[in-house]
Image: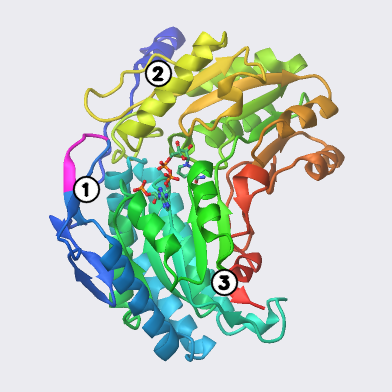
Amino acid sequence: MTSTPARALEDIADWAYAPAPQATDVVRISPENGLFINGEFAPAADGRQFATVNPATEAPLAQVAEAGQADVDRAVAAATAAYELVWRPMPGAERAKYLYRIARIIQERAREFAVLESLDNGKPIRESRDVDVPLAAAHFFYYAGWADKLEYAGLGPAPRPLGVAGQVIPWNFPLLMAAWKLAPALAAGNTCVLKPAETTPLTALLLAEVCQQAGLPPGVVNVLTGDGAAGAALVAHPGVSKVAFTGSTEVGKAIARTVAGTGKKLTLELGGKAANIVFDDAPVDQAVEGIVGGIFFNQGHVCCAGSRLLVQESVAEPVLDRLRRRVETLRLGDPLDKNTDIGAINSRVQLDKIRELSQAGEQEGAERWSPPCQLPERGFWFPPTIFTGVSQSHRIAREEIFGPVLSVLTFRTPEEAVAKANNTPYGLSAGIWTDKGSRILWLSRRLRAGVVWANTFNKFDPASPFGGYRESGYGREGGRHGLAAYLDA
Ligand code: NDP
């Protein structure tokens, strides 16, 4: 034996992951990208464009057309014609074939989608490759199965599509949100005009290319890249019968005001401030993994993130000790490195918001902790951060930070846990960690949250409905319930 046990331990402490970069040559980004209207890519009517950048480097990736009112009019007209002439009259079994085809092509081009998503969004390739893209394909597969069975969805014997769906999506899961919106709408027989977020337009455009490749009839799916004004114009357009929005509560409220009294159907999937509740009988290592996944997955840019940890007082110290040790092992950096756990923040605006709220946390008296962590010089970065000594009145306990920042509160009894978990204007999700099934059932009946995870967190499945209470919005996406939003039963 040449090395002593002490020496061996030192070697382990010095050991670091070698870089494991994902090749980017699977992706070809066109320097200029048009709007996708009536099955073709074309510039905006007024020729306007904007740049989309790689948030990990701030390097421009491409120029993208910026849709204006004339483009919204054109897209809605194309979607209306496709609805009347092709998509509505088409038998469900035929529509299903297109959805299956889109799902299969997403699978075939999975690596291309994953790399493009990580380049444009900043999320780790491991997440885009293993979560976003497979789940996007799964949504098309799942809803393809419903297209010829709508009369068995429990929504009446002859449910009818609504017409043109105007769909506005955010930047945190650009491809996945596009799939959440398009797949049920198309299965139900509607046509779509989709407005992706300004900072993440590229995978929606690649999905448009996939629609072309699948031979989807022109006008059935249209993609309008642009800013909030394009989203507002789409939502207000009289030719749109159904509006589906995911994003901030503030914009959701503005959309609800626009749509009120128009007869348009509306679903809103808005923000959250979820409680992740850990009891003293929880398996600690498993709970720590769930806490880490709950808040640091996708840099915390997750509407249902477990951003408030409620830990039972008697186990708070050991749980926090292990949590800090675990967070020290997370690797932050190049999103395209297969070892990266935490990628870039999506935009400077979002980074400023995270910084501002974290400063407010310190000023209000909470204790801030981050592991030693070197941030890259260029790009938008924020280290994983844990606040302890948080009280319910602190802004970091009330407002959605939408970043890798965890606020820790404690409780003594299950009743106190419920009261604190529900003390939020939001109500999207919650997590419970305990060994007792009866306690899970007791709590899940009392938590005001659309989704309650037990001994796990951030698990998604196309068959499972997702949505919120109160300021987290209304309507459900996913599962049989997700069809109701797109059918007039
Ligand atoms: P927004 O709600 O502004 O954006 C979501 C989508 O709506 C984007 O496509 C956006 O376009 C578009 N939009 C903006 N204004 C309007 C409008 N008046 N009418 C119609 N569509 C509009 O979210 P932000 O990106 O500004 O993020 C702000 C905060 O919102 C985050 O910090 C986070 O707290 C929360 N958020 C929550 C999300 C969730 O999943 N619940 C997702 C994203 C953000 P554009 O990209 O050009 O602004």
- Amino acid type at image mark 1: Ala
| Residue shown at 34% from the left, 52% from the top | 229
- For label 1, the residue is 23
Indicate the quadrant of ligand 1 in the picture.
Answer: top left
Task: Indicate which label's residue lies in the foreground, 2 or 1.
Answer: 1
Dot 2 falls on a residue whose secondary structure is helix
- For label 3, the residue is 486
Q: Is residue 463 left or right of residue 140?
A: right
Residue 4 visible in the current orientation: yes
- For label 2, the residue is 12
| Residue shown at 50% from the left, 25% from the top | 405
Q: Which residues are magenta?
A: 56-61
Task: Indicate which label's residue lies in the foreground, 1 or 3.
Answer: 3
User: Could you tell me residue 110's position as x and y percent?
Assistant: 34, 60
Which quarter of the image is occupied by the C terminus? bottom right
Dot 1 falls on a residue whose secondary structure is loop
| Residue shown at 59% from the left, 48% from the top | 459
The total of numbered circles placed on residues is 3
Q: CA distance from mark 1 to mark 3?
A: 39 Å
